[in-house]
Amino acid sequence: MTEDRPLMVSVRELSFSYRQDSSAVVEGLSFGAPAGAVTALTGPSGSGKSTLLYLLALMIRPTGGEVIWDGQPTGRLPDATRSQMRAARMGFVFQDSLLDPSRTVLANVCDSGLFAGMPHSVAVSRAQQLLARFGVQHRADHRPGEISGGQAQRVALCRALLTDPKVIFADEPTGNLDDDSAQVVWQALADHADCGGTVVLATHDHGLAARSDVEVRLIGDGGVEVRSANGHQ
Amino acid sequence: MATSDGWSGTPQVREILRDSIAGARAQIAATLTTALVLATVCFTILVTTGQSAATQAHIIGQIDSAGTRLIALSDNDGASGILSTAPEVISGLSDVSWAFGLGAAIDVTNPILPVGRAASRVLVGELPPELPIIQGRAPRPGEAVAGVGAATALNLGPGLGRIQTIGQADSDPIGVVGVFTATGPLAHLNDVVLIAQAPEDVGTLRYVYVMAVNVVIIDRLEHVLTTSTPATYPVAMTVETPVGAIAWRNAIAGGLSAASRELMALIMAVGAALIAITMFTATTSRRAEFGRRRALGATRSVLVASLIAQTAISATPGVVLGIVSGLGTLMIGTGMVPAWRFTAGVGGLVLLLALVASTPIAIIAAHRDPLRILRVP
Ligand SMILES: Nc1ncnc2c1ncn2[C@@H]1O[C@H](COP(=O)(O)OP(=O)(O)O)[C@@H](O)[C@H]1O
Ligand SMILES: [Mg+2]
């Protein structure tokens, strides 16, 4: 079912190592994340899931191969263009929320809009809608230190969704969450895919992987197993 | 949600500014620290070097008085033949505040009480403010005013009186309508009676006194007077400039400037180091923020611009506070404040230092790998 969907972001013969003398985290990797689907990157801890997300999100440059966005190779793009693509087309949910502790929840959500070029007034009204949708609107004026981990992750999700991005990357988004919060986060990601968006998540949660449309399993030494399912439920 | 690609990925300048203000408020402790350090540096510079700058300006103001600006053209033996139109011509020069001319000395006496005598000279041009009338009024053509010494010597009473050339008892006496007093370089005129005359009624002049508008242009003005004073034989004329006074002024001004410049350089160096340390601390403490923002899609230039804006936002109130408190302290302590240019220069320099100090740190921070802070240990 997923095979006929266009690939939003894909990699071809991708290799990466953090240092020249260290072994490759990924080597000769090829796969694609189709639009309108959730793609799960799975594998044991240290297998390179996060690293692969950073490569896909153009935060680091591969040592070999290509990251392809919308059919366009990105290897030669300057840093500014890669940053602009990140701001305009991607949303990122980090493993530990990664909120600015000095600013309010509302300001944190608006942050992604600033770099995308969104007017502040638009960002604020969108942020308020999103916070309400995820049941954290009453925390809008609180600092991240004053909210729970589950609430922080919902706030991070609001920030990723603010610009209505083509692709959402999520790194262990349910890692430290209770079941209810995990379900809210998963549902938001699945909804984004249902509306035509692309979702790539790194997870070691087998349940989450099973519900994804595509599973890319990192099996060590740069190897990979790809499984396509019939869609998330 | 439908996915859109409607954003440019380039923040608007207005929004960066708004964000920088929000950031300065969110990190109020860092903002206040920066502001306070800059205020202290400004304050210190002002109360130390600002005081000597004010003192220096004060002293120069005193030196730059009439004495250092008066040029005397003289033709002691009448060989040069300075024309009576010279004061009028010279007064017309833009570098000149005033000029008047004096004729040759003729002894006069008081025909009613002819025991005393005094020298008289024809006066061409206005009586200058440096020769204030202290009794009676200023003379019209054909009338005379006496210096205080001459008035006493001629026994001129409160109602004043008349004078007559000695040895010419049949000549017409001239009315004395006022008494003036002279100080400084014109003090010798206290013993002289000045008889006002229209230029066309006078032959040649022996002296022309010229007041320059300021000391700086003295040399230039001396040259102009030497070459273009109307006279029959200009070369026979001597031009006396207050050379000693100028040298004295230059020496003092130069010495004061050098001293305050050294002190200022020292304080600036210490201040710059302090500012650099503050900026370094403020910027490095925000590394996590830079990493997060890079991950969210901030370009390096946006990051640098927003950091510079935030520095300016915290620095400006600090500089203003430092200047206001510094000027206030100087005003209360010494009653003198430095020139506004000096003050503005200090403020601008400190502001510039803060920006210059934080820019390389911002650039380095923007180039740092964003992943470092994304790593969950
Ligand atoms: N900044 C780094 N420098 C060097 N090695 C790193 C760095 N970050 C991660 N690694 C290594 O790369 C490998 C993959 O890490 P990571 O992508 O975080 O895996 P995962 O997310 O699957 O746990 C690990 O062996 C890890 O130690
Ligand atoms: Mg990871």
Image (cartoon, coloured by chain):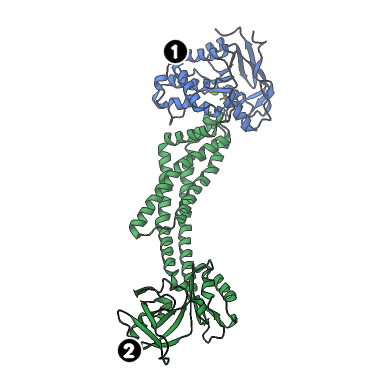
Chain colours: A blue, B green
* Residue in the foreground of this view, choosing between B74 and A153: B74
Residue A41 pos. (x, y %): 59, 17
**Residue A151 at least partly seen:** yes
Q: Do the residues marked 1 and 2 share a common chain?
A: no
Residue B355, above or below A111 = below
Q: Of the numbered discs in the image, which one, if any, rests on residue B73?
A: none
- The tally of labels here is 2
| Image quarter where ligand 1 lies | top right
User: What amino acid is found at the position of numbered circle 2 in the picture?
Assistant: Leu
Quick one: which residue is furthest to the bottom in this view? B167
Residue that mark 2 sits on: B113
Residue at 54% across / 12% down in the picture?
A191
Where residue B58 appears, as percent x and y from the top left, is 41, 64
In the image, A73: left or right of B43? right
Q: Amino acid at mark 1?
A: Asp
CA gap, disc 1 to disc 2?
A: 124 Å
| Residue receiving disc 1 | A180
Residue A23, placed above or below residue B85: above
| Label 2: element kind | loop
Give the residue at x 43% y 70%. Answer: B65
Categorize mark 1 by other alpha carbons within 10 Å: few (<14), some (14-19), many (20+): few
Chain identity of mark 2: B
| Residue B369 in the image, given as x and y percentages of width and height | 57, 33
- Observer-side mark, 1 or 2, equals 2
Instruction: Report x, y in % for residue A27.
Output: 66, 24
The quarter of the picture where the N terminus of chain B appears is top right
